[in-house]
Image (spheres, coloured by chain):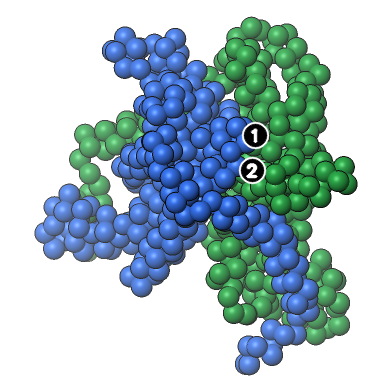
Chain colours: A blue, B green
Amino acid sequence: MAPLTRRSVLPGFGLTLGLTLAWLSILILIPLASLFLKTTELSLQEFIASVTSHRVLHALSVSFGIAFAAALVNLAAGVLVVWALVRYRFPGRRIFDAIVDIPFALPTAVAGIALSALFAQNGWLGAPLAKLGIKVAFTPLGIFIAMIFIGIPFVVRTVQPVLADLEPELEEAASSLGARRWQVITRVILPSLTPAILTGFALAFARAVGEYGSVIFIAGNLPNVSEIAPLLIVIRLSEFRYADATAIAVVMLVVAFLIIFAINRIQRWAQTRGVVSYSVT
Amino acid sequence: MSTIAIATDHVLPLAQRDARSEPRVLRFLVIAFAITFLSVFVLLPLALVFVTAFAKGVSAYLDALSGSETLSAIALTLTTALISVSANLVFGLLAAWAIAKFEFRGKTLLITLIDLPFSVSPVISGLVFVLLFGTQGLFGAWLQQHDLQILFATPGIVLATTFVTFPFVARELIPLMQEQGTQEEEAAVSLGASGLQTFFRVTVPNIKWGILYGVLLCNARAMGEFGAVSVVSGHIRGETNTMPLLVEILYNEYQLAAAFSVASLLALLALVTLVAKTILEGRLEGHPASDD
C-alpha cells in the first residue's frame, strides 16, 4: 500500500519533469521576466509618471472599466442563458448550446471585423440603432459590445455544469417547506451557483481586459476617448518607446495575477462549501 | 390500490410543478431572452461573415482566395500552426506524464504557471518577444552580429503563437491522466515493458481522444491568433502576414469582400473545430475538463 514506492515503479519522472521545467522557463518564464527587467530601466518616479500620464490612465480606465461592465452583463445574461439551456426545452436548444463556444473558437480579428460591420451606421444592426440616435461602432459603446461578445462562453460554461448537477431534492425540500418559487431560486439555487458565477465573471473580466483583436476594429481608437490599453502598448512599440509600452504591460499583468489569485480563492471557498470544483479554459 | 394510484397521479405532478418550474410567462421570457441574446451577439456576426464574403458572387470570392498574398498567408498560417501545435503536443505529453503520474512538491504552482499564458493579454505575449529579440532587446545586438532574424520573420511568429497556445494540450491531458491513475502503467512495467513501450502501448491508447481534443483547440487558437502575432510580425506583405493579419490589412483598405472572404475560411475553421469538439466530448464523457 505504500504509494510512494509504488509510484516510483514508473520511469521517466526526472526526464519529463526536467524537460517540462526547461521548456516552461525558456518559452514562458524568461520572456515574462524580461518584462519586469525592462521596467527597471525606468526609475520609480519615471515608471509612475509613465503609467499615470493622462493618456495611459484613460486607456487603462477604458480597458478595466468597460471590461468590468461587460463582465457584469455577461454575468446576468449568462445565468439566464444557462437557465434556459439547462432547465427548459425549446426548438434549437442544442444548436444554441453549441454556438455559445463561438466567441471562444472564432479568431478575434474575424469577430472584430464582423462586429464592426454589424454595428456600423449602415450595418444590419447599426442602421436601425442609428435611426434611434444610438451610435455603437467607433465609440466606447462599441468596445462594450465587443467585450460582451468575447466574455459569453466564460459565465455560461462555468455555471452550466453546476446547475445541471444540482440535486432536485434541495428545491423540492424548500418548496415542500412552504417556500415560494422565487424564494427557492434566490435562497437555495442562486447561493449554490454563486462560486461558479463569480469564477465565470472573473474569467470574463480578465479576458476582456486584455482583449485586442475583437475590440480594435469597432473601437474607433480615439486617444482619450476609445483607446484601450493593449492598443496603447502597440502604439508605444511602434514609436520605439519600449519602456513606456512595458510599463503599461506590467500594470496589466499585475492586475491579471490578482484576478488569478481571486479565482483560486473563490474555488477553494467553493470546495470548502462542498460545491463541486471544475476547470475552465 | 386504485385509490392510492389515483391519489399519487394527482398529487405528484402538482408538487413537481411547484418545486421545479416557473410560471409559463416567465419561462417564455427567459427562453426568448436567451435566443435573442445569442442570436444578436453570436449568430448575426457569424452570418454576416459569410454573407459579406459572397456579396460580390462566388467568382469574386474564389478570386480573393486565390491571390498570391492570400496563398502565402495561408501557407504561413499552416506552417506556424504545424510547428506550434507539434511543440505544444510534445510539451503537453511530457508535462502531463510528470504531473499526473508522480507526486512532488510544488505541483499546484507548476500547473498555475502552465496556465499563465491564458491570463496574459495577447499583445503582452508578443511584446515579451520584442523585448528579447528586438534591436533594443536583450539578445538584439547578438542576433544582429550573427545575422539572425527572429522578429518580423517566421521564427518570431512561431514563438509568439507557441506562447499563446502553450497550455491547451497540457491542461487537457493532466486531469484526464490523473483520473486514470497509474495501475495500468505499473502492470505493464512490472511485466517487463520499457518506459517508451508502456507510454505508447498503454498510456497513449487511453488518452488518444484527450490528445485529439487538446490538439484541436490548440490548432484553432494557433491559426486564429491575432494580437500576439500582430506585434511580432512587422506586417511585411506576402512574407510575414498570417491569415488573421491579412484580414486586418484588407479590411483597413476597405476591400470588404476580400477581407470577409479570408475571414470566412477562419470562421469555417472555427465551425469545424466546434463540431469536432462536440463529437469528441461525446467520446470523453465524464471527463472533467471537457467543459471549456
Instruction: Give the letter of the chain under mark 2.
Output: B
Instruction: Give amino acid for label 1.
Output: Ser
Q: Position of residue B7 (x, y in %)?
A: 17, 57
Query: Which of disc 2 and disc 1 is earlier in sequence?
Result: 2
What is the secondary structure assignment of the residue under circle 2? helix
Of residues B28 and B252, the one nearer the viewer is B252
* Location of the N terminus of chain B (image quadrant): bottom left
Cβ–Cβ below 8 Å for labels 1 and 2? yes
> How far apart in space, not on screen, are marks 1 and 2 (Cα)?
8 Å
Q: What is the three-letter code of the residue carrying label 2? A: Gly
x and y percent of residue B22 in the render? Answer: 22, 44
Mark seen at residue B126: 2
Count of marks, rendered view = 2
Residue of label 1: B230
Which is nearer the eye, B79 or A160? B79
Vertical side of B271 occupied by B183: above or below: below
The residue carrying pointer 1 sits among few (fewer than 14), some (14 to 19) or many (20 or more) residues within 10 Å by Cα, namely many
> Residue A138 placed where, x, y %?
43, 21
- The image shows residue B121, relative to residue A163, as above or below, that is above
Picture residue at 61% right of the left edge, 29% below the top: B267
Mark yes or no: residue B169 visible: no
Q: Is label 1 on the same chain as label 2? A: yes
Asked if residue B197 lies left or right of residue A272, the reply is right
Q: In this view of the protein, which residue sits in the foreground, A240 or A187?
A: A240
Image mark 1: chain = B
